[in-house]
Image (cartoon, helix red, strand yellow):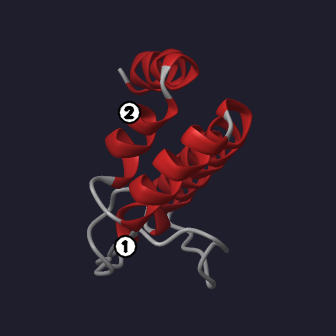
Amino acid sequence: MGAVSAVLLILITILFPPIGVWAVAGCGADLFINICLTILGYIPGHIHAFYLEYVYYDRREQAREGRYAARRAPGVYSDRVQTGGQGYGTIVQPTH
């Protein structure tokens, strides 16, 4: 199911980048920035949206493997993207 949702998200982002950003980051600064970039130029909106999606899925995969990023990704303001959807800044360490 994860791969299907990622492909669907990429297809939606190709058509309209702010919807893809809203899906991973929610309504916040990242969405506002993406809307502005999309208005200024369609390609900058795409670059920003795909960058946010890359960070989101990369952090989600790291959390699934038990590795957590030590630093925040530059240019990303959403805690949801920073943690890969694993909560809003609160990550419970797995017990072994």
Query: Which residue is depicted at the point 38% across and 33% down?
Result: 19
Q: Position of residue 45 (x, y in %)?
A: 62, 41
Q: Amino acid at mark 2?
A: Ile
Instruction: Provide the secondary structure element on which disc 1 rests.
Output: loop
Residue 61's disc is none
Front one among 64 and 76: 76
Name the residue that disc number 2 marks: 19
2 or 74: nearer the viewer: 74
Say which quarter of the image contains residue 10. Answer: top right
Q: Quadrant of the C terminus?
A: bottom left
Q: Is residue 42 left or right of residue 7?
A: right
Q: Residue at x 43, y 67 (%)?
A: 83
Amino acid under disc 1? His
- The single residue placed furthest to the front in the displayed view is 40
Q: Which residue is mark 1?
A: 96
Q: Residues within 10 Å of mark 2 (few under 14, many from 20)?
A: some
Residue 55, quarter of picture: bottom right
